[in-house]
């Protein structure tokens, strides 16, 4: 007498597992991409803050106005994520920089008069590259 020893999964069981994994991936991809854009915005904000700090030190040392060009990595225009858009750098909020994007660098200018810095995408010819 032969014993029917069936090991493994049926085709229906494998298809159900594949369908469940596909649904989980479809849910996870939009969440992952939004988190990726938030991290890009946070990186840009940190680079702008570091450029402002570097420009401030240079103004104090040389007593001349300084402009740094910061290349953006975010793909959506402007700062939108909570915590980043309300961040203040030298008295300026990042939400005022509405067209910052990976193809438009941001220029950070610190003057010797002690006024608030200029942080915008208007090109400056003698700007130093920051990153």
Image: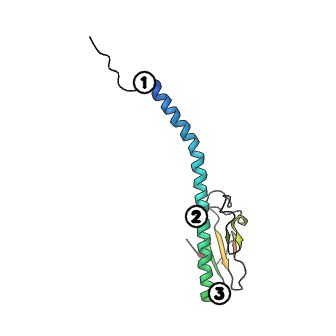
Inter-mark Cα distance, 1 to 3: 76 Å
- Percent position of residue 72, x then y: 61, 64
The crowd level at tag 2 (other Cα within 10 Å; few <14, some 14-19, many 20+) is some
Dot 1: what SS? loop
- Percent position of residue 45, x then y: 62, 66
Inter-mark Cα distance, 1 to 2: 48 Å
Q: Which of marks 1 and 3 is in front?
A: 1
Give the residue number, with chain letter if any, for mark 1: 10
Observer-nearest residue: 123 or 97?
Answer: 97
40 sits left or right of 11 in the view: right
Residue at image coords 60%, 56%: 37
Dot 3: what SS? loop
Give the residue number, with chain letter if any, for mark 2: 43
Observer-nearest residue: 68 or 8?
Answer: 8
Question: Mark 1 and 3 residues: CB-CB less than 8 Å, in contact?
Answer: no
**Tag 2 or tag 1, which sits nearer the N-term?**
1
40 sits left or right of 98 in the view: left
Q: Residue furthest top?
A: 1
Residue at image coords 48%, 32%: 17
Quarter of the image that includes the N terminus:
top left
**Tag 3 or tag 1, which sits nearer the N-term?**
1
């Amino acid at each position: 007498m032969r014993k029917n020893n069936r090991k493994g999964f049926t085709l229906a069981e494998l298809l159900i597992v594949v369908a469940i994994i596909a649904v989980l991936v479809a849910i996870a991809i939009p969440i992952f991409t939004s988190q990726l854009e938030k991290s890009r915005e946070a990186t840009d904000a940190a680079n702008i803050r570091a450029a402002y700090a570097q420009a401030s030190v240079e103004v104090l040392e040389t007593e001349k106005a300084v402009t740094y060009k910061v290349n953006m990595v975010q793909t959506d225009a402007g700062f939108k994520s909570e915590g980043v858009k309300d961040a203040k750098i030298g008295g300026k909020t990042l939400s005022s920089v509405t067209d910052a994007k990976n193809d438009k660098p941001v220029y950070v200018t610190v003057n010797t008069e002690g006024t608030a810095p200029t942080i915008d995408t208007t090109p400056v010819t003698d700007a130093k590259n920051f990153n």
